[in-house]
Amino acid sequence: MHILKLIFKNAFRHKLRTFLTILGVAIAILAFGLLRTVISTWYLGVEASSASRLVTRNAISLVFPLPLSYKEKIRQVEGVKEVSYGSWFGGIYIDEKHFFANYAVEPETYLKIYPEIIIPPDQKSVFFRDRKSAVAGRKLAERYGWKIGDIITLKGTIYSGNWDFVLRGIYRGRDENVDETAFVFHWEYLNESLKKTSPLRADQVGWYMIEVTNPNIAAEAAVKIDRMFKNSLAETLTETEKAFTLGFISMTEAIVIAIQLVSFLIIFIIMAVVANTMSMTARERIGEYAIFKTLGFGGFHITGLIFGESLVITMVGAALGIFLTFPAAKIFGKELSTYFPVFIVEPETIYMDIGAALVVACVAALFPAWRAVNIRIADGLRRIG
Amino acid sequence: MKIPIAYNLRNLWTRRITTVLTASGMALVVFVFAAVLMLAEGLRKTLIETGSNDNVVVIRKASESEVQSGVERLQASIVETQPEIATGKDGKKLVAKELVVLITLPKRGTDKPSNVVIRGIGESSMALRSQVKLVEGRMPRTGTAEIIAGMSIAKRFQGGGIGETLRFGMRDWMVVGIFDAGNTGFSSEIWGDVDQLMQAFRRPAYSSVIFKLLDSSEFQKVKERLEKDPRLTVDAMRETRYYEKQSEIMARFLRILGLSLTIIFSLGAIIGAMITMYSAVANRVFEIGTMRALGFQQKSILTAFLLESLLLSLIGGIAGLFFASFLQLYTVSTLNFQTFSELAFTFSLTFEIIYQALIFSLIMGFIGGFLPAVRASRMNIVDALRAS
């Protein structure tokens, strides 16, 4: 009991230094937590994807379309429960900086395949009926203050011209990790307009979304679909939704790796700061440790004292940092909602925070403890400052 | 009277561990600070070198990028007849009607697919881009399924090397040449005959028309004429501006990331410096008292401690820059969110960055050392001398 008391007394002997160290640890843990959240957000799309959904796209690349006629053929494949399709619209609202995902889908099948997108029933039926209508995610609607019935104009980049949509619904996600910043409208609206302006581009879709009856046959169904269209004008590539999202992420891998590296650098920096504090503390108290030794306390106690002090300082800092992570993530997520539609702190991040703080505490205490244990009593007593 | 600088140097040497720890903390911060600046600079350099100020890119109105654009044959021919277009050595107009599509190709070794730009080129395409040079093999013959690949494609993608074949658009394409485009975006592209590629991908329209201006200052005139022509629905912009726009989102992302990291990191380092300097002062109360008694003024004590902190941060800054300079060997390749194609760029260290990083480290040292130095200079002589 006494040793605990001593550890606390020691830790707060130099109030200013301890305060500064705690502050440093808190900032580092906060930054570490935020960066970790950025990384987990990057992979969130993967987690949000279902194992029983497949995505079929043109084998050349995503920019090439597939004919609408494939729909019925895909539906005949064994194990396919539902087929929906969509096209990336890539429209611009106001200017390029106001980016959000917008695409055209066949609404009824789309909502069947994606049950995590929840639209109130009354809004849903109006949305289904009105071909010129669109639904937007809750966060997106909040960002621009859209209300039901508003007319939203997007400037087409792939499909030229200005396109007007009537907002008929605002969807929310069933789970926390559902992207609530997307803008979805009727594929028919796009197609009918294309038939008038550029008939060559009509009746083509960007991708098919397929729901299979059972996740176990997903791979088999994917192979079957691809084989069906082999050697045709538009060969297909079918993968699970997870692999499809991962494909995007692997292309931005460099950024993820950089962020990962930086998050570890932060831990190194704070290690240097805490190690500095601990080595200064131990140097000042070398005389005291010598006295402890004279009184008969062994290396175990002295090591315990130094490690304990290091732990107290880092843990208080870490607790403060973790506590601050939540409001900071909220602000961060709001400011950067263009880049990160969903920004939530996951429990794993907190565990990693605590783990990192523990490592910092131990590494920082290692060298001072070794010195304090190994110094000869006479030398320790002789030493000043 | 001034306290000699040797005093500070010897003090830093006596407390070696503390000096190293504090300086390394600062070095890491300067490292990150410099790395972010270098990355942004590298991206900027790549973009500037990719575009030429004399070249004009014509794409379909509001289409933002060549990949999304489509310029019909008739429209392309109208653009081709503009009188401001320069003529090349052979007397032909320096104008190219090009096709740009994205395809997915697997990388060497990992088999991971990545998006690659395929550009259908015309006769003048090479002449329009002085930064692109054929380094191996020959140019593709028109009317054949021959292609040339950029250096980074040849190195990193399966089937990209000379003599190898790539399969896309239901045909096999033979790589007959490798071109070097330096740090520019063209290095990650594959070039082939535009008419063959349009056939293969079943595209009825070109993606863009690119031409060189005879007189760079006439740009505004051509732009207005093209954009007002009722037969055309196009946007014309300088090539430099076009490529700058292509990676605006990426540049902004790097800026936000860099800025927030630098702020957080520097807070940590300033705290580190503060702790060190406060303890340096606390350990030397007696010394300070003695110096004051010897007649050194408050001002000199303040300067001495500030100087020590600045020295410390300078050591950190130089160490950080030293390690950051090795980053220049590393190439970052990532997906450009705007074009969905690969964007490769290197870290680039300039004198301006060196200078900014050192100033930045000195500022950290100043902020970290100021309060402790004030405390040192304000000490009461008698009390200080009484301290053991």
Image: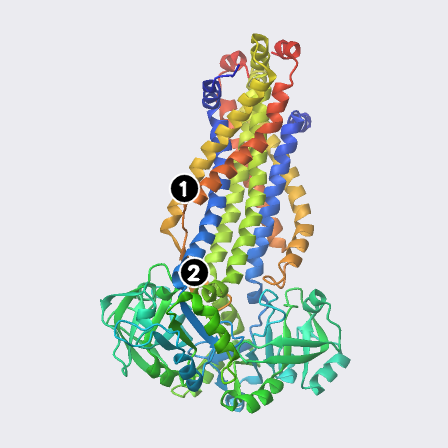
The tag on residue B323 is 1
Q: Position of residue A12 (x, y in %)?
A: 67, 28
Residue B150, which numbered label? none
Q: Which residue is painted at 63% across and 56% down in the image?
A: A346
Amino acid type assigned to the residue bearing label 2 in the image: Leu
Judge whether A231 appears above or below B51 on screen: below
Which residue occupies 60% across, 38% down? A24
- Tell me the element at label 1: helix
SS at mark 2 in the image: helix
Q: Which residue is mark 2?
A: B47
**Residue at the right extreme of this rendering:** A122
Crowd around label 2: few <14 · some 14–19 · many ≥20 (10 Å): many
Mark 1 is surrounded, within 10 Å at the Cα level, by few (under 14), some (14 to 19) or many (20 or more) other residues, namely some
Residue at the (65%, 44%) spot, across then down: A321
The quarter of the picture where residue B294 lies is: top right
How far across and down, in percent of the image, does residue A197 sit?
Answer: 55, 88
Between B364 and B173, which is closer to the camera in this rendering? B364
Q: Is residue B204 above or below residue B273?
A: below
Task: Please determine whether, in this image, residue A336 is positioned above or below residue B197.
Answer: above
Identify the chain of the residue marked 2, using the numbered disc in the image: B
Q: Nearer the viewer, residue A160 or A31?
A: A160
Q: Is residue B93 visible?
A: yes
* Image position of B69 (left or right of A27): left
Question: Which of these two is toward me, B241 or B98?
Answer: B241
Q: Amino acid at mark 1?
A: Phe
Query: In the picture, which quadrant includes the C terminus of chain B?
Result: top right
Total numbered labels: 2
